[in-house]
Amino acid sequence: MTTETNTAGVQRPLIPWVLSFVRPYRGRMSLLATLLLLEVGLGALQPWPLSIVIDNVLDSKPFPEPLGRWIPPLTGDYRVHVTVLVAVVVGGVLLQVINQFVTAYATQVQVETGQHMVYDLRYRLFDHLQALGLHHHIMTSTGDAVYRVDVDAYSIENLVMSGLFPLATSVTSLSVMFAILLKVNATVALVSLVVIPFLYGCLRYYSSTMVNREERVKELEAKLIGRLYETFSAMRLVKSFARESYEAGRYASA
């Protein structure tokens, strides 16, 4: 998708439009990117404590560098085994705790920044709708306008926080894991690339299908919200003429 359509139907480039919401929060975005990179690094380190326990403590293999410079291969002294085992377990637990803290803080920054961008888009939509002519407001239901400002404003958060950042994080994680696997076993790493064409085909098919269905769902939701707004704004008349059953039927058939 390279363009977006505003309320007046004018085509604008999507990337500059998104950047206009991201630019005021450059500091938060940089912090979030740093936290996500740190999260990827901590995630890549999580299997290492278990690997050290199995290969170097239980199997008495030499420790990998740089640990091998300070810790010699374990001998038959069980006290040394226990000491190293406890140290590795404590290190693994600390790694998990730090990773959870980073994840929680990144989520907090992500939610706060996303909500700020949603508010900015709502303000722009509200200001734009007020600037439209009276003919537009006569031809368009008030409920539809309320839906655009209230619900569609979340599109910027979904695009940036639920789309671009998770995509970048996933690509970085896969790249790091592939590099590690390539160093451990190049054959297995190359064989794992076989699934990429099938994965791409599935994503391409389902993404195109889901886009059409999501647009249809959005249209139905806007219609339902419009019907609700019309009914509740005229609730005095509905009550006066006992039209509750009729309005319920209209809502059910919307």
Image (cartoon, grey):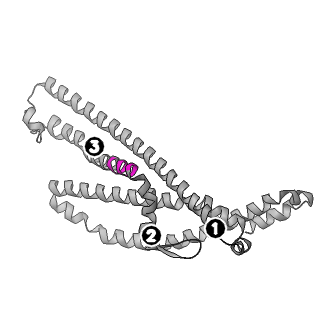
* Residue 131 - label: 1
Mark in front: 2 vs 3:
2
Q: Position of residue 216 (x, y in %)?
A: 59, 71
Q: CA distance from mark 3 to mark 1?
A: 54 Å
The extreme top residue here reads 79
- The residue type indicated by label 3 comes to Gln
| The stretch drawn in magenta includes residue 32 | yes
For residue 188, which quarter of the picture? bottom left
- The residue type indicated by label 1 comes to Ala
Residue segment shown in magenta: 27-34
Q: Which residue is mark 3?
A: 46
Question: Which is more N-terminal, label 3 or label 2?
Answer: 2
- Label 3 Cα neighbours within 10 Å, binned few <14 / some 14-19 / many ≥20: some
Mark in front: 3 vs 1:
1
Q: Is residue 137 above or below residue 147?
A: below
Residue shown at 30%/33% (left/top)?
A: 94
